[in-house]
Image: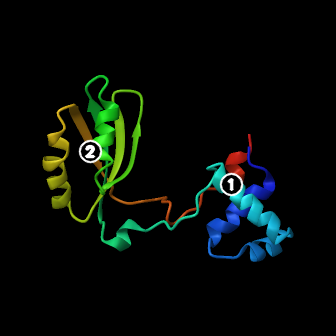
Amino acid sequence: MLDELGQKIIKELQEDARQSFREIGRKLEVSEGTVRNRVKGLLRSNTMKVSAIPNPEQLGLHFMCIMGIEVKVGAAERVEKLLIRNPNVYYLCGCTGNIDIIGIFLFHTPSEFDEFVKDVIASIPEIVRTSTFVVMHISRSPWEHNLDVAALSKS
């Protein structure tokens, strides 16, 4: 469980990951060393990661879709390993239900997606069926909205 100071440090880094540990310490009224040690611990425990989150739209990736993929029994891991090699795969997870894999895919154009389906999806014999949902608009995204760690830590 993440304590209150850890939550506040993460919130500060979400606002501006470039600010110094000294600046965060000043805002939170703790020492620079405390912030440094806490950040090291959060990184080491894989509780957080500090990185840039690009906005796909600004990179020209204007066609986004979500695809549910049904595969032959026992083939999900192999199909996932094949798919994650492709740079157009933004997010991929195994799941339960009628669909075995759900992915978010990013492309510049619909025709680029069409080529992906023909060249990549169709070339994987373990894929039985896909259901594709074209994203019409985005209401919440990781590049515009921070995860509210404090609210989610309350239980």
Which mark is on residue 132?
2
Q: What residue type is labelled 1?
A: Leu
Residue 72 appears left or right of 102: left
Residue 76, position in %: x, y? Answer: 33, 31
Residue 113, position in %: x, y? Answer: 20, 55
Residue 28 appears left or right of 60: right
Residue at image point 80% right, 73% down: 27
Q: Residue 74 lies in what quarter of the image?
A: top left
Residue closest to the far top:
73
Tell which of 47 and 36 is nearer to you.
36
For marks 2 and 1 on the same chain, the one whose residue lies earlier in the sequence: 1
Residue count near mark 1 (Cα–Cα under 10 Å), binned few <14, some 14–19, many ≥20: some
Residue at image point 13% right, 48% down: 118
Residue 116, position in %: x, y? Answer: 19, 52
Residue count near mark 2 (Cα–Cα under 10 Å), binned few <14, some 14–19, many ≥20: few
Which mark is on residue 42?
1
Tell which of 38 and 102 is nearer to you.
38
* Quarter of the figure with the N terminus: top right
Q: Residue 98 lies in what quarter of the image?
A: top left
Numbered disc 2: secondary structure: strand
Residue at image point 15% right, 41% down: 123
Residue at image point 35% right, 36% down: 101
Label 2 close to label 1 by CB (< 8 Å): no
